[in-house]
Image (spheres, rainbow, N blue to C red):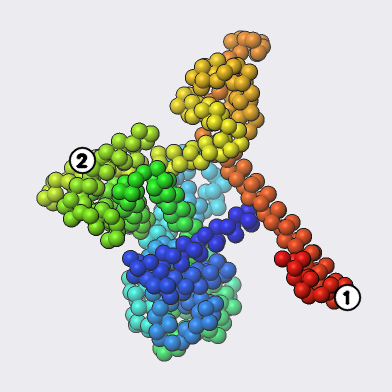
Amino acid sequence: AFMLSLLKVSKWMNTVRNECSKKENGGTEKHGNYAEGIFEGMIQHGRLNMERAMRVGAQKLNCDIADSRERGLFQDCFRKLVKMQFIERAPSGRLLPPWFNELDASVKRGHKGLKSEFGDMGEAQDRANSMYLQKNRARFMVTPGSGHGAGGLTELNQQAVQELMQKNQIHGIKPDAEGASVGSTNKASKRARRGKATLHEEGEGDDGGDPRGKKRVKREPSAASSSGSHDGDKIEDMVDWRINPDEFNERLKEDLCVDFIAARMDAEPSEVFRAVMRVYRDKRHQATISCGTTSGSGVNPQVFTTNEVVAMLAEDSTIVQRHRQNEAREVVVKVLDSRLWGHPLLDIVKPLMADQHDGHKYNQSYLLNFRGLTEAMQMNKIESTIALKFDRKAVRIFRLLQDQKALEVKAIKDKAMLESMKEAHKLLYSLLRANYIHLYEVPKDTTHEPKRTFYLFYINRELLLDRFRADTYESVMKIHKQHVEAERKLSNFKDDLLHQVHSGELSMEEADNRYN
């Protein structure tokens, strides 16, 4: 797990630097470096507010955050990270379990222990719904003007106040009429009775007002609060941000799909599919943001139109350079209908209905078969692994079992065009031992004798993927062990050479020649 996390982190940082430095995203190489510094700081610290994240990034890059120009660049990079959904807001308090959103009457009647712990189940369900709704609504929102001393509470700041008040309610703290929190929690209730508790004090800690958090804020004031204390900046300092791993996993799938299509098609279909995936990513971000609204998400990321694909084509693409806009639309429709929809192995896209109200007869709506494409990509990777471990005949058997639900040995031997039953048994049981195929036993009677039992070979997709992941992790571990062993031997060899040089047995030139 540690080795895999190291591999993921390096890939994530490269993705952040490349995406934030792209010209189409409004970035430069400097934006990419600054965004990478902020992201690296969040990896090391886990959760940081906006001010501390920028300070940590500036410290890593040896920049002066007090400079207004440098501070503005760091703020732009932070907003880029949020806009691209590389980082997200961390929940301000302890959330109820997610399954509280889907409690039915039978669950409410059956869980007596939960009733005694959380009180009325209906109230707990409503509270969980509102908590998750508030969390999702402000998941990818940054306060406009944060860090510039903007006075007053914006809409986002009001949502942050609601989150903090919700957190106080979870910990048993009830707000009074003036916004201070009073209740039965240790030091917070004493401060409230003395009239010294404030919303800022209660929001800093996770345990109902940790005095260490309060001292930390006083010891490290932000640049905005030094010029004047404002409610918006205080609440923005209370908001912690964390890494969003789901976004990187989704981007990895999308990039792999683009490479998968580019390796099997010409230039024009590859460019069109790349534009389709960019539309899919934008709509996926819109769906993620709108899931926190009361009306829910009305965006289907897999549905797109021809005009959206044409608008998303890169300016330096061959389709735009060779054709005018109307001709480019015709080329896009032709590629979608004849190459991506009519693919012999998989319908990558499927047409839905034509949209005629905008005056373009070529504005057709399509549905991206993203799930089918990822499954085909996974199976293709497994087939290449089987070809390396065994041979092409084993790949023929594997493809045959993908198309058929279950087959006996004789049927597999005939359809896979194997020479003999002995060869069929050898390949099948080799794949079975490696857990790439699976076996059904269907007895004719209760004796379970081999002669009176049907043996059907099939593929269980979930077990197959688990086996493939285990093999991949084992290969990574072996590579890591070999690398560590080679580094250890090289270090010992270097130490021996240095010892011989210090003892006078070898000269420095001879030691360098042996080392090289």
- Residue 234, image quadrant: bottom left
Asked whether 356 or 277 is in front, the reply is 277
Asked whether 453 or 263 is in front, the reply is 263
Q: Which mark is residue 378?
A: none
Residue 301 visible: no
Whole-percent x and y of residue 477?
A: 66, 50
Q: Badge 1 is on which residue?
A: 503
- SS assignment at label 1: helix
Q: Is residue 218 left or right of residue 292?
A: right
User: Measuring 14% from the left and 49% from the top, which residue is drawn there?
Assistant: 360
Residue 249 visible: yes
Report if the CB atoms under discs 2 and 1 are less than 8 Å apart: no
- SS assignment at label 2: strand
Q: Amino acid at mark 1?
A: Ser
In the displayed structure, 503 sits above or below 347; it is below
Q: Amino acid at mark 2?
A: Met
Whole-percent x and y of residue 382?
A: 53, 38
Q: Badge 2 is on which residue?
A: 353
Which numbered disc flags the more N-terminal residue, 2 or 1? 2
User: Measuring 25% from the left and 40% from the top, which residue is drawn there?
Assistant: 337
Q: Is residue 474 left or right of residue 133?
A: right
How crowded pointer 1 is (Cα within 10 Å; few <14, some 14-19, many 20+) is rated as: few
Asked whether 169 or 408 is in front, the reply is 408
Q: Is residue 202 left or right of residue 470?
A: left
In the displayed structure, 71 sits above or below 471; it is below
Q: CA distance from mark 2 to mark 1?
A: 84 Å
